[in-house]
Image (cartoon, grey):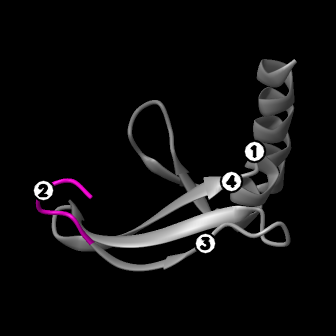
């Protein structure tokens, strides 16, 4: 980890979960932060909000989820 960032806990990647999660302290103003990576569909399914282009935190609705997944497929092709 980078200087000043402490790993609190982590869940390793599994083929069932298809994600890896790590909780760190010191990354976001000293608060605990969950870092999640994995299959885009799984990450999107686990997300409730997102940060828009203006930097506002916005609730993620079903239409947004569908658009994100469609964008991921478009970029991957």
Q: Nearer the viewer, residue 19 or 70?
A: 19
- Identify the image quadrant of residue 13: bottom right
The mark that comes first in sequence, 2 or 1, is 2
Which structural element holds mark 1? helix
| Marks 1/4: CA–CA distance | 19 Å
Please state the horizontal and vertical placement of residue 73, each as a whole percent of the image.
Answer: 86, 29
* As drawn, 8 above or below 6: below
On the image, which quarter does residue 25 sit in?
bottom left
Residue assigned mark 4? 38
Residue 2 falls left or right of residue 56: left
Whether pointer 4 and pointer 3 mark residues with C-beta atoms closer than 8 Å, the reply is no
Q: Which residue is mark 2?
A: 3
First along the sequence among labels 1 and 3: 3
Out of 7 and 66, give the one closest to the viewer: 7
**Residue 64 got which mark?**
1
Disc sitting over residue 12 in the figure: 3
Q: Which residues are magenta?
A: 1-6
Helix, strand or loop at mark 3:
loop
| Element assignment for label 2 | loop
Q: Residue at x 55, y 60 (%)?
A: 36
Q: Residue 67 in the image: state x and y as whole percent.
A: 81, 36
Packing grade of label 2 (10 A; few <14, some 14-19, many >=20) is few
Q: Mark 1: few, some, or many residues within 10 Å (few <14, many ≥20)? A: few
Q: CA distance from mark 2 to mark 1?
A: 36 Å
Which residue is pictured at 81% across the width and 51% down the height? 41
Give the CA distance from mark 1 to mark 3: 28 Å
Residue shown at 38%/39% (left/top)? 55
């Amino acid at each position: 980890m980078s200087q000043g960032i402490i790993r609190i806990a982590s869940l390793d990647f599994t083929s069932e979960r298809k994600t890896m999660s790590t909780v760190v302290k010191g990354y976001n103003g000293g608060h605990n932060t969950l870092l999640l990576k994995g299959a885009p569909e799984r990450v999107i399914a686990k997300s409730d909000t997102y940060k828009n282009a203006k930097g506002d935190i916005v609730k993620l609705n079903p239409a947004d989820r569908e658009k994100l997944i469609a964008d991921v497929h478009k970029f991957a092709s």
